[in-house]
């Protein structure tokens, strides 16, 4: 078999674009390697205790990152709890229910919601959301306060504010990916169900069932966003490292401690500790993103196969 | 009509209503935010805001001229890094679509897009700030550039793939080499879309704060020196919003308004442009 001849221009063009594409891959690898290397001092010094202990005292050289992990996990999960039903509702409405003309505007508005800078969300959080949450917290009846979920002083800067603002920020992401996934469900699925006399909601349930894997992927993408969100959260969460179940307690997140302490780090070990937190954020978001992309890719691939099958049956080879 | 079908129809209507409710709940914050930013910020927007330096604490007035300049410089630098890498990798993925290598590049772009911006800030600090013991505008530009790459790569890929395959085939049939057909036929038709993508990426990036905190840092002075720390709109808004003075808060709202207007303007322009592109595509 003879090799296809390639002209000099083609060769140059190909090697040009592939070298730039290589740079992209290289940047991702470099981020992982550099962060890992820079966090070696604390990994050696504390090992796994870094993630198990609670004392964070840069001056005395004690670094325990557990409260930050707790804050990140707790705020993100709360945010997902609020955001997931709303995002899926939005996705269903836009892709299944809403009239064609309205669709463009709704898509545009959700895109806008995703484009608002997080610093603006944070400002709105400080000056509008936190006072509102403080008032709301004031309404909680006395008997509720004995529950760990609602204990503590009611100051407004709290886990609750952080979860709310994160939810608002996650909704446009999750809903736009979920919308793409719903769009990938073959029309035949809906038409068959309608033909059998299903109501709109019953059809939607079938579509959702078909798209469930991709929907899980879209929720995971939202989780990745929530883990990494920095500015809006540090402006409303109160930045106090503590392990507390209370929604009203000020807490701290991993991204938050990096943003607040990096510039004023006390010593090299402190920097290394913060970089290790960043490294773990990198790994976690890597895994979440890779996982959800695989799920969503699976969905769209399935769709291509389905389309091919339909095409074959509609246009038999002449 | 039997009871069962009535129940099914009611369930259907209730669920549709809940979906409408979800849309309203999702969009209410957007309305709230736009309302507050405009109503609080509009009073402090004047010519001074764009042309004056920040005043010392206690003196009213002043502006954010240095921060606006800083944002222009840092975003410009970011675009300078990201545009070649982003566009070239986008073309690469579109051209080799479906191959293992193209999938790897696209996967890397997706991962890069998902990395928290603060982590990118830490990375750039480690490679471009700590070796020189100096916060620099250049480092800020690198951080923003890294964040722009996946956005540009993604839109470039989509736009190149939107160009009808028949155009490429036509050029090849006329005897053009693959690269020539790409450069003279496919890319020019994808160009408006690619430019739109770059503008959108710039709008996204202009509001980023976290990756700039410890790369470009902040500065109280007018600076255009790439080797010095530089103030940007988002970092300045952050500093003012978290400060204790009412004057600062007013300035911060004004800064937020400028940022929102920037994002709004770019999004609307991009929306209009892509609408026209889509119409052209379907018209063909």
Image (spheres, helix red, strand yellow):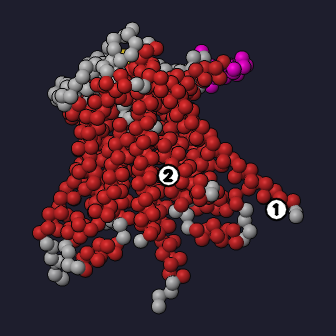
Task: Residue at 70%, 60% (x, y): give it.
Answer: A200
Task: Residue at 50%, 38% (x, y): give it.
Answer: A169
According to the image, label 1 marks what residue?
A: B5
Q: Is residue B154 above or below residue A68?
A: below
Image coordinates for residue A279, horizontal then vertical, percent: 33, 36
Report the magenta stretch's main SS.
helix
Query: Residue A177 has which mark?
Result: 2
The reply to whether residue B220 is in sight is yes
Q: Nearer the viewer, residue B130 or A123?
A: A123
Query: Is the C terminus of chain B in the top left, top right, bottom left or bottom right quadrant?
Result: bottom left
Report the Cα–Cα distance between label 1 and label 2: 33 Å
Secondary structure under badge 2? helix
In magenta, the rendered stretch is: A139-153
Q: Nearer the viewer, residue B274 or B30?
A: B274
Q: Is residue A52 above or below residue B149?
A: above
Secondary structure under badge 1? helix
Please identify the quarter of the rendering in which residue B100 is found.
Answer: bottom left
Query: Is the N terminus of chain B in the top left, top right, bottom left or bottom right quadrant?
Result: bottom right
Image coordinates for residue B221, horizontal then vertical, percent: 25, 20
Q: Is residue A130 above or below residue A296?
A: above
């Amino acid at each position: 078999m003879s090799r296809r001849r390639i002209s000099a221009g083609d060769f140059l063009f190909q090697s040009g674009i592939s070298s730039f594409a290589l740079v992209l891959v290289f940047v991702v690898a470099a981020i992982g390697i550099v962060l890992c290397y820079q966090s070696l001092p604390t990994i050696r010094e504390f090992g796994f205790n870094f993630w198990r202990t609670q004392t964070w005292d840069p001056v005395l050289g004690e670094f325990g990152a557990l409260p930050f992990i707790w804050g990140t996990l707790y705020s993100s999960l709360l945010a997902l709890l609020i955001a997931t039903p709303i995002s899926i509702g939005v996705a269903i409405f836009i892709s299944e229910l809403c009239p064609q003309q309205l669709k463009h505007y709704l898509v545009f508005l959700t895109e806008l919601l995703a484009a608002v800078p997080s610093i603006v969300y944070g400002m709105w959080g400080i000056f509008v959301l936190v006072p509102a949450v403080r008032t709301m917290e004031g309404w909680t009846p006395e008997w509720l306060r004995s529950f760990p979920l609602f204990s503590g002083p009611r100051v407004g800067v709290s886990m609750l504010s952080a979860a709310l603002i994160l939810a608002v920020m996650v909704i446009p992401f999750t809903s736009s990916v979920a919308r793409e996934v719903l769009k990938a469900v073959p029309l035949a699925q809906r038409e068959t169900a309608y033909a059998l006399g299903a109501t709109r909601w019953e059809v939607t349930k079938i579509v959702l069932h078909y798209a469930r894997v991709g929907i899980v992927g879209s929720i995971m993408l939202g989780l990745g966003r929530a883990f990494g969100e920095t500015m809006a959260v540090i402006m409303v969460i109160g930045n106090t490292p503590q392990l507390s179940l209370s929604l009203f307690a000020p807490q701290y997140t991993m991204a938050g401690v990096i943003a607040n302490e990096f510039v004023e780090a006390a010593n090299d070990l402190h920097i290394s500790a913060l970089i290790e937190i960043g490294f773990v954020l990198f790994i976690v978001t890597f895994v979440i993103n890779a996982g959800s992309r695989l799920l969503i890719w699976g969905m769209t691939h399935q769709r291509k196969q389905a389309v091919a099958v339909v095409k074959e049956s509609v246009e038999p080879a002449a | 009509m039997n009871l069962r079908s009535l129940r099914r129809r009611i369930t259907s209507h209730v669920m549709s209503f809940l979906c409408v409710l979800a849309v309203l709940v999702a969009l209410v914050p957007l309305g709230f935010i736009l309302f507050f930013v405009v109503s609080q910020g509009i009073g402090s927007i004047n010519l001074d805001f764009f042309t004056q330096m920040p005043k010392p604490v206690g003196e009213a007035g002043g502006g954010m001229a240095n921060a606006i300049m800083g944002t222009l410089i840092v975003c410009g630098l970011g675009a300078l890094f990201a545009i070649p890498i982003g566009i070239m990798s986008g073309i690469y993925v579109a051209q080799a679509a479906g191959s293992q290598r193209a999938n790897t590049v696209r996967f890397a772009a997706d991962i890069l897009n998902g990395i928290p911006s603060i982590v990118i800030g830490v990375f750039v600090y480690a490679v471009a700030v700590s070796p020189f013991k100096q916060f620099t505008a250049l480092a800020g530009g690198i951080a923003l550039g890294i964040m722009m790459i996946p956005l540009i790569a993604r839109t470039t890929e989509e736009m190149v793939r939107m160009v009808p395959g028949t155009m490429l085939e036509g050029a090849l049939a006329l005897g053009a080499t693959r690269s020539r057909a790409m450069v003279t036929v496919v890319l020019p038709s994808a160009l408006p879309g690619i430019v739109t993508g770059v503008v959108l990426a710039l709008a996204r990036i202009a509001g980023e704060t976290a990756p700039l905190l410890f790369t470009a840092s902040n500065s109280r002075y007018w600076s255009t020196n790439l080797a010095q720390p530089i103030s940007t709109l988002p970092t300045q808004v952050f500093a003012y919003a978290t400060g204790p003075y009412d004057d600062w808060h007013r300035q911060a709202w004004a800064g937020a308004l400028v940022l929102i207007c920037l994002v709004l303007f770019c999004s609307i322009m991009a929306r209009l442009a892509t609408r026209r592109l889509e119409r052209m595509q379907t018209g063909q």
